[in-house]
Amino acid sequence: MHRRVVKGAEGAHSPARTAAYFLCLIALLFSCTQAWTQGVPAEIAAQLRASGPVLNVPQALKLYVPLQAAAPKEGVKRTNDIAYGPAERHCLDVYEPAARPAVPAPVLIFIHGGAFVAGNKSTPGSPFYDNIGYYFARNGVVTINATYRLAPKDRWPAGANDIGAVVKWTQENAGRFGGDSRRIFLMGHSAGAAHAAAYAFMKGSQPKEGTGLSGVILVSGVYDPTLEEKMPVAFLGGVPGNPNLAYYGPDTRLYPGRSILMNLAGPPVRTMVVYAELDMLMMQIEAGALFTALCRRDGRCPDLLWLRDHDHMSEVFSVNTPDESLGRPALDFIRGR
């Protein structure tokens, strides 16, 4: 994995300067990211490129559901709907290798997205996000697919608190499924990445004894509501208004204290930051901002993965198909390669 420290400018920026700064950062990141070009079928890549950097869930479903129909599921034992807390959505599924390994296996916790207001670990009639559990369990990783409370009923910091409860449950129960409680990795997508990052990096979201994590994989997340509040003007030519206010709340004066980028006070943890070539611009900018902030904080940079030909949904829908753009490097990260 190629790494390079990208130093960001200090101080306040006007919207125009902020936009120029982050756009330049994205261009620079292209020179130090690793792109996994194998895997995306040419006909799928062409259709994703034709749509461009937008959120197009129906298209991603149309393209990847047929591939998932043939996805392998053998060699995996699945246990559904285990409660990890008192709320209705405090629920998880466990995928474990059917053949118990001689040595306890690493454990991956996957947290789905859904713009803070929707989403689930598994949906009847859909292969998502069962595909995550089957892929990693087939490859020797005990996988926990968890859901969490949603906004607007449950606002910040409910997501990070729920992640903490999942980690605690995993520490106490991983051994029952052949997992190693000392090797727990956390992976989140979109809003799930925001919750995962809040738990992994914000000291106020962590228990006194530490996070219990060996690593965190953040896929196309959002990490700073103050930046998102300005982004429609600075980057997209729109009007002010945070698209995620259902979770962060309407009082923007509270946003600095809820920003992951402004509160990286937790201890360092191995990190992989992931974003897609056809992600919405907001996701690409925030990936760059988080990468830069972690480089500055730690004096070394996290792993950074750029997914060629993928968009915001196809990157996770591709897991457990012949397209291993995301699955293989995430697996290598877990294995310490």
Image (cartoon, rainbow, N blue to C red):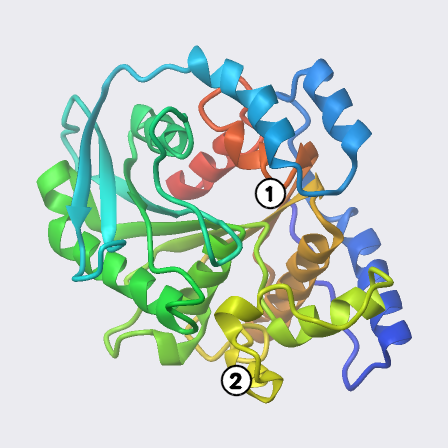
Residue at position x 11%, y 44% from top? 175
The residue that label 1 is drawn on is: 1
Question: Any mark on residue 257, and which?
Answer: 2
Residue at position x 58%, y 79% from top? 262
- Residue 17 image point, x, y percent: 89, 74
Using a 10 Å C-alpha cutoff, classify the residue at mark 2 as few (fewer than 14 neighbours), some (14 to 19) or many (20 or more).
few
Question: Any mark on residue 336, and which?
Answer: none
Q: Is residue 279 found left or right of 328 in the rendered image?
A: right
Q: Is residue 1 found left or right of 151 in the rendered image?
A: right
- Residue 86 image point, x, y percent: 16, 62
The three-letter code of the residue at mark 2 reads: Gly
Q: Quadrant of residue 320?
A: top left
Q: Residue furthest front?
A: 153
User: Are dots 2 and 1 in contact, CB under 8 Å?
Assistant: no
**Which circle, 2 or 1, is nearer the viewer?**
2
Report, in whole angstroms, how far the alpha carbon at label 2 lies from the one at label 1.
33 Å
- Is residue 73 placed above or below 12 in the rendered structure? above
Secondary structure type for disc 2 = helix
The three-letter code of the residue at mark 1 reads: Met
- Is residue 127 placed above or below 35 in the rendered structure? above
